[in-house]
Amino acid sequence: MLDDDLKQQLAAYLERVKEPFELVATLGQDDKSKEMHELLELIAGMSDKITLRTDGQDARVPSFALQQPGQTPRLRFAAIPLGHEFTSLVLALLWMGGHPPKVEGDVLAQIKALDVTLDFEVYMSLSCHNCPDVVQAASLMAIFNPGVKATIIDGGMFQQEVQARDIMGVPALYEGGQLFHSGRTSLEDILKKVDTGAAQRDAAKLSAKAPFEVLIVGGGPAGAAAAIYAARKGIRTGVVAERFGGQVNDTMDIANYPGVPETTGPQYAAALEQHVRGYEVDIITAQRVTELMPAAEKGGLVTVKLDNGGTLQSRTVILSTGARWRNVNVPGEDEYKTKGVAYCPHCDGPLFKGKDVAVIGGGNSGIEAAIDLAGVVKHVHVVEFMPELKADAVLVSKLHSLPNVTVHTNQQTTEIRGEGGKVSGLDFKCRDKGDLTQVPLEGVFVQIGLVPNTEWLGTTVERTKFGEIVIDAKGSTNVPGVFAAGDCTTAPYKQIVVAAGAGSTAALSAFDYLIRTPAPASTEAAAKKTAAI
């Protein structure tokens, strides 16, 4: 089940368990129950603080709970949490055993202070790299607040339950039997929903911060590189982002970053954050920026407004907001999102095991998705707008070697059809002849490129008709003191390594601007006043 390396790592982690607790398993006679029992015996055998019981009476079989002796369990896994969820299991064991979590002290205090009764159910798949954040958030809340319960459910193991709830995308977070959130989210975002006063408190706290010299909007490769280069100059640096890592978190395999032969998106995103935290950088996550207000005078403070009502100020701002998946914009797409329309094959692919699906898009992302899905689903239809697939030759060759893939080129998607509240088919027509093809299927994965996250800028900063921020060779925009880098700009190649280089360039340009542009007296006074608060 676990190779020797993982066993050694697990044993080393479990040495940090200081307080006794129990693993209480509800098992049957099936293979999954035997596999779960084997894993739990292995864990219990590695620590004298952990006791295994097999007298559980939970309705979900197999499952196991983590609980303090004599207490009612609040955290349960209806899953064998390996794959992407192995880290979630290890963290739950450590937290239950008294090892402190690596979250900000005020966040943990907020969890403990919640006066709520919550019953979370998290549906995930072991191949989903977006799921661990939600699993770990729910687990943390259940362990540290007696009013919170959390059950982590592997959709692949409990397919009847998934089908009964029409879950066609993970992670899916339920509370009290009702859908609470679908898709990736963070601990901070969950807390915002359940702690109604959190947004107002956050806004006041953020608005009281002293002005930055460089404020980076966005935490992907471009933003991280900018933060590192700015911080190394010894200037006051901040990063504000919805999530650190950005779109990289949704990338599975990375094999073209120089010096890093192979890694995954989540691993690379975690490494970026760790690197940035090694410097004196104020990292502000789970915040959405809504407006940019240029400085009133040259060298003055640029203001960034947040959706919670708070504001941040800085003498320079670097925009590195990245991009998101492009919608195909046909009837049925919005209606059937999470009901058969998906954008992450690694996350949602296992939910379509044995079913027919389509991938819209013949670039690298689309063909990689089709190859992955072909190993899980019954049949994959690849639909490409252009006369030929645009992916790299090695990917196209691999695709054509698969027996359960059909490629449709020169086709325009016209509609995603549904029945009974979920996807039932895909319609597309030949761009030359106009012939309409209707394919019955249950899942559609959209992989047709990216759209820059720049709508919030309006006309404040010059953008192209595609929404890309116009920059020069130094990353400067048309607004003094405002720079940009990465996938949200006119840089021609949307690659991680290109974005990182652009972020470094923007930070160096911002520093050059600072040393060549004196701050007006009003800015100096504002900084002193804030620092005195």
Image: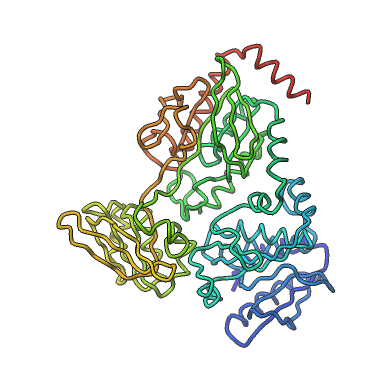
> Residue extending furthest bottom?
29
Asked whether residue 5 appears in the rendered view, the answer is no
Q: How is the image coloured?
A: rainbow
Residue 232 found in image quarter: top right
Whether residue 104 sits left or right of residue 423 in the image: it is: right
Image spot of residue 363 (x, y percent) = 33, 52
Whether residue 430 sits left or right of residue 248 in the image: it is: left
Asked whether residue 181 appears in the rendered view, the answer is yes
Query: Considering only vertical position in the picture, is 10 above or below 63?
Result: above
Query: Considering only vertical position in the picture, is 4 above or below 290?
Result: below
Assign the C terminus to one quadrant of the image.
top right
Image spot of residue 445 (x, y percent) = 39, 60
Residue 497 found in image quarter: top left
> Residue extending furthest left?
433
Residue 446 found in image quarter: bottom left
Pick the front one: 504 or 193: 193
- What's the residue at 53%, 19% (across, down)? 512
- What's the residue at 48%, 22% (across, down)? 479
Image spot of residue 133 (x, y percent) = 61, 56
> Residue extending furthest front?
420
Whether residue 19 sits left or right of residue 261 in the image: it is: right
Image spot of residue 144 (x, y percent) = 77, 59
- What's the residue at 29%, 68% (across, down)? 439
